[in-house]
Image (cartoon, rainbow, N blue to C red):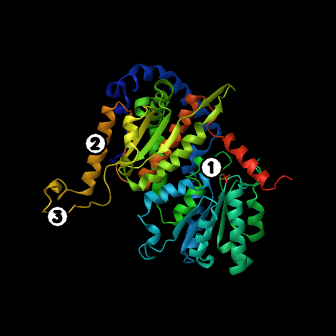
Amino acid sequence: MKSEILVDVSRATAKAVGPEHGVTPREVQELEPRISEAHQKLQEERAQGKYGFWDLYKDEQTFASVKETAEAFLSKQIDNLVILGIGGSALGTKALATALKPPFYNLLSRRARKNKPRLFVMDNIDPTTFKAMMRICPPSKTIYNVISKSGETAETMAQLMIIVELIEKKLGKSEMKNHVVVTTNPRGAGAKPSLLHPVADTYSLHEFTVPLNVGGRFSVFSPVGMFPAALLGMDLNAFRQGCHAMDTKCQTPELLENPAYLCAAYQYIADVRKGKRISVMMPYADGLADVADWYRQLWAESLGKRFALDGTEVYAGQTPVKALGVTDQHSQIQLYREGPNDKIITVLEVQRFDVTLRIPNTLEHIPELEYLRNATMNKLLAAELTGTIDALKISQRPVIRIRLPRINEYFVAQLLYMLEVETAMAGRLYNVQTFDQPGVEEGKKIARQLMGADK
Ligand code: PA5
């Protein structure tokens, strides 16, 4: 039997950190009918196809076409993959690449990269960074995947306009189709037309679609995340299996058996009953650092809402914060232990790293280092994790512990899928519209006006 992801909430209970800060069995019990009701509602919405993230992994045809297209582009010996996109169009790819490609991936030789391209995720419009990318990535050796669900995001469009000019100048218009792939909303079917459609038409570009019922931050298992993943040589089948395994686990309304609902319930109670207005995610693995970044957007945009579903003003949502173990032990833990007790901390733990690194028997003349000699970095990391969560317990700070057996496609998919379901459940508990982001739209509108649009 395959080992699975484990969720341990025991350190977020009243028994562990006291009733003022930890969740009591009674509070969980009281929430259970709401969880059952929310579960019912989510299942109904899923069956109606209202929100599509649940079933993306089942779309065999799309996965096959993503793979086939990626293979065709890879056969052209491209050196660089540049993602033009922002928010949900970029963070999933970042999370997957950091987790599943080797550290310092872009610095490896082509051979060590197994003939796969380097990755540059351009999710900002800082001109210095963009220009630097243009210098590093000659268009003749680069594929640009422009990703925008709405097909109108100013940042992404500006990036694309620069790249179009570059390709036209350096390679000629006819080469555009060999270097640019579009991922955007579907044509027709009630969708607002994407500005990327006429671009794709003009240059005969390959076009992937993001289903209409899938929001940007829930789109990692659509071509938004899967096409870059395929180009980088990730195992798409293992993603699908991981999603399937977690989906199966998340079918039950039983809190103790449903890891996503369990996390949602604890985070929700911690927020509304215990004043834990901040949700920290702290992976103890560099590979999972960008999962925390991805989660930050998911949690913030989905739950940070002014209005409840019934129109009352609620100003819901915890503030998500990302941290990294052990690095941030030397930066944040002082605050987490002794500052305001307003946080619930989710620690991500990896049971087995791919590498074991022994600390050698050197510096013998320093007896104070004896405890490190002949130990491993892995053991030190594990000890620091245990030390930190034990110390947090002493300070009565609630911690949820999520343990991945390993970092690979199967378990990373499980983790991301679980966090998506957790967010969907949390949205129901807060009684907000999880899947929109009206607060983002206003700023976009003002910026567009300042740039002279809508004249
Ligand atoms: O989750 C979301 O919907 C947003 O974060 C979007 O992904 C982000 O605003 C980018 O939008 P688009 O993909 O339409 O360019």
Residue 67 position, x and y percent, is 55, 64
The mark lying in front, picked from 2 and 1, is: 2
Q: Left or right? Give the position of 291 relative to 69.
A: left
**Residue flagged by tag 3: what amino acid is it?**
Leu
Q: Where, by quadrant of the figure, is residue 263 drawn?
A: top left
| Ligand 1 contact, mark 1 (Cβ < 8 Å) | yes
Residue that mark 1 sits on: 216
As drawn, the residue found furthest toward the right would be 455
Label 3 to label 1: alpha-carbon separation? 52 Å
| Nearer to us: label 3 or label 2 | 3
Tell me whether circle 3 and circle 2 mark residues in contact (CB < 8 Å): no
Nearer-N-terminus badge (2/1):
1
The numbered disc on residue 363 is 3
Give the spatial CA distance, label 2 vs label 1.
37 Å
- Location of residue 425 with respect to 65 vertically, above or below: above
- Number of other residues with Cα within 10 Å of mark 1, as a class: few under 14, some 14 to 19, many 20 or more: many
> Mark 2 sits on what residue?
387
Q: Is residue 299 something that shows in the picture?
A: yes
User: Is 268 rendered above or below residue 234?
Assistant: above
Q: Is mark 2 on a helix, strand or loop?
A: helix
**In this picture, is 179 found above or below 64?**
below
Is 86 rendered above or below residue 49? below
Mark 2 neighbour density, 10 Å: few (under 14) some (14–19) many (20 or more): few
Amino acid type, callout 1? Gly
Q: In which quarter of the image is residue 353?
A: bottom left
What residue is rendered at 66% in x and 45% in y?
213
Query: Which label's residue is closer to the chain start, 3 or 1?
Result: 1
Q: Residue 260 vs residue 300: left or right? A: left
